[in-house]
Image: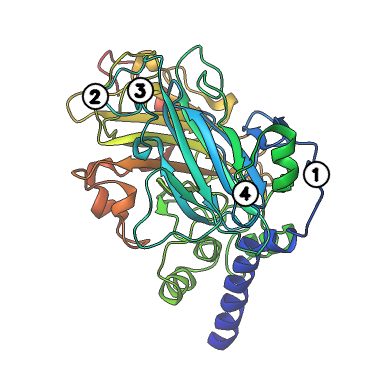
Amino acid sequence: MRAVKRAVLAATVALAASIAMAGQARAALVPDGYNPQGLPTAGCFWTGPFTAADEKTNMAYPGTEITYWGAKFRTPEGAVLKLHGKYPYARYSSLNAYESSGGTPTGSISDRQIKPDRGSLNTSIPGHNRKAKKRAWTVRVLGTSAPAKAARNTLYAAPSDGEYQDILYRVYVPDKGRNLAGGTGTPTPELVLADGTVLKGKALCAALNSNHNYVANVVPPSLYNSLVNWPGKDPLTNPAQPQFSFIKFFSLGQSMARYKSDQDFKAAWEANPVEQGTFYANNDARYMTGAVSFRYGQLVVIKGSLPTTPKTYRGEKRTKAGQMAEWDMCTIESFATTKTHKCLFDEQIPIKGKKRKYTIVVGQAKDRPRNAKNKCGVAWLPADPDGDGAGRLDSALLLTRNVIPSAGFKHAIQNVTTPFNAAKVMGRYYPRGSYTSKAAFQKLGCPKAGL
């Protein structure tokens, strides 16, 4: 029996790897402008915006306060691609490079790392004038792997399949009243050929063979169903447990092993104890997920301490540095769909006292308690009415992300070293959850100081 389990586990891990690399099989050469899914575009170079609000682009778990634009292209030999952008009126922005369509990050450069153009100001750095008019930057995108010492303002984006490069531009938490790109638009591409010729617009896209062939990278329904119905597990609740907990995401294979037994999950970790992002993870962020089944209770109540973050949403002119750049909590579907329903970011969550305690209540809209509102010191996070997106309406996943913790903050997800020590490492910043009923929560009332 043990041999059979090990064989199945090995097959699952191998299949997870094949899913993560599935985009490589789809990376056959296509005409420039190829867009079989009819995705939105921002010019001929950028695909997007990718948002949770658009059914076509709700893939790879986009945060509802976050927007992405993707670009797939091939840089001609000897040419250099330059991106000319402006720091957005937003909390954070970055460029990430990925392994084809597999979604594993290979390199990144955040706004805080980008040196501004001469005469401009990096408005993303705490203490700088966020409303400065001159806020331009230029980044080179090279089709090579990063050297031991990376060059300034350079994103290394090697084509993992030997053909296409794949990058994403991200904007987190645009200032209130600004558009998804934070009021400054997407970076403008410029291609300098080996002979010095400069190409822009459609000529650039033709030379780069730019295309918009993005496909949701999900676990096949047959595999997902086999995990949900794993022998010895309750398919109505698996992988949720009566005692709710968050576990750091290390790899897709380990996340899939959670649907089996504790022994299988431990074996998956021991077999591959490394972090390997997928689903177009942000290289500047780390994630934890928690499995929910409302069969254990109508509501999940999450409590913890909120790290300090820069206040930017109301268009502040200057902001102070925080313990991290951004924090959020989201309700998402399973990796059979990789869809996001709703997120709350740090500034939307009421806090209490010097320890910045918070309470988040998660549940279906019909089960929202009267006192689950900011006035009562409680943040309400609605669960996805489609459940796991694969037929189980009372199942859900919670996801929380930490973005660029400060060097002195040791309680971020980034500091968690195994799937088993998150609570110890994060201390009071670890989000602890418990199930309850609507009636029981309403009995707590609405104290002015919060729950």
Q: CA distance from mark 4 to mark 2?
A: 46 Å
Tell me where residue 127 appears, x and y as whole percent. 24, 23
Looking at the image, is 229 positioned above or below residue 40? below
The residue to which callout 1 is attached is 34
Asked which secondary structure carries label 2, the reply is loop
Q: Amino acid at mark 2?
A: Lys
In the rendered structure, which disc, 4 or 2, sits on the residue that comes first in sequence? 4
Q: Residue at x 49, y 44 (%)?
A: 140
Marks 1 and 4 in Cβ contact (< 8 Å): no
- Name the mark nearer the viewer: 4 or 2: 4
Marks 3 and 2 in Cβ contact (< 8 Å): no
Asked which secondary structure carries label 4, the reply is loop
The residue to which callout 2 is attached is 320
Q: Residue at x 37, y 54 (%)?
A: 150
Q: CA distance from mark 3 to mark 2?
A: 23 Å
Marks 4 and 2 in Cβ contact (< 8 Å): no
Q: CA distance from mark 1 to mark 3?
A: 38 Å
Tell me where residue 434 appears, x and y as whole percent. 39, 42
Tell me where residue 73 appears, x and y as whole percent. 67, 49
Q: Amino acid at mark 1?
A: Tyr
